[in-house]
Amino acid sequence: MNNDENPRSEQPEGGASAAPEAPAPPPAAEVSGRQRLLAGLWPPRLSRAQLIVAVLLFGLGLGLAIQVRSTSDDSALRGARQEDLVRILDEVDDRTQRLEDEKQRLDDQRTELENSSDQAEEARKQTLEKERQLGILAGTVAAQGPGITLTITDPSGAVAPDMLLDAIQELRAAGAEAIQVNGVRVVANTYFSGDAGDVEVDGKKIEAPYEFTVIGKPQDLEPALNIPGGVVQTLEKEQATVLVERSDDIVVDALRPAQRPDYARSSSP
């Protein structure tokens, strides 16, 4: 046969076999890809769009967490026993009642304070008014109001102290509230002394003409002096001249010093 038909591989001389091949190194593409991945992740480089997406994702996660917690609370109530629900409802009712009671207590305290303040202010006003009235009667404060002026002229010196005292009594009976005679304040214990033409009021000498300044209702004071047989007619019999003038603004400003009683004390507690 021809040698060309069955070709054979030639064996190396000496019958020795071929040496095994060394393992191939890892592909360079795999190493470079990992390095590129790491380089892309660190250090982080966020664009504006990525930052916005991160914020939106955070908000979405927070909302989901709150929803899950709320659902869990509702689920806890739905899963509670009837006895537990009744107890929870009773606690809520008790808490509401306590708050209502506290509100009512505070409202009552406010009302009490307001009333106490109003009462104290009203009592203070009444005390001041009472003090003013008593001061007018005691002659320790000045007074002003409508009234009359009574002027008695005594050219013959025949007007006696008791005639002037009668004039005071008639004026008081007619409603006089404050009187002064020639600058001397007339009070409850005022007295007239002396003789005709030589008159003293509470130990102070006064001279004619005798001028009475009187606060009261003029329509009552003047007629009381002019009644038949009254003060005016009695004085005119002694040749005295009497003049009565009404006025809407009479001032009684003669004052008496406040005196403390030696023995009398208030019986009020």
Image (cartoon, grey):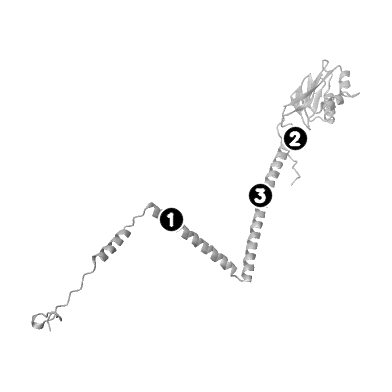
- Type of amino acid under label 2: Gln
What residue does disc 2 label? 133
Percent coordinates x, y for residue 197 in the rendering: 81, 19
What residue does disc 1 label? 55
At a point 52% along the width and 62% down the height, the residue shown is 67
Contact between marks 2 and 3 (CB within 8 A): the answer is no
Picture quarter containing residue 240? top right
Pick whichever, 132 or 166, lies toward us.
132
Percent coordinates x, y for residue 86 in the rendering: 64, 68
Percent coordinates x, y for residue 136 in the rendering: 74, 32
Pick whichever, 114 or 163, lies toward us.
114
Pick whichever, 27 or 134, lies toward us.
27
Instruction: Characterize the local packing of mark 3: few (<14), some (14-19) or many (20 or more) Cα atoms within 10 angstroms.
Output: few
Question: Distance from label 3 to label 1 (Cα)?
Answer: 52 Å
What residue does disc 3 label? 110
Question: Distance from label 2 to label 3 (Cα)?
Answer: 34 Å
Q: Earlier in the sequence, mark 2 or mark 1?
A: 1
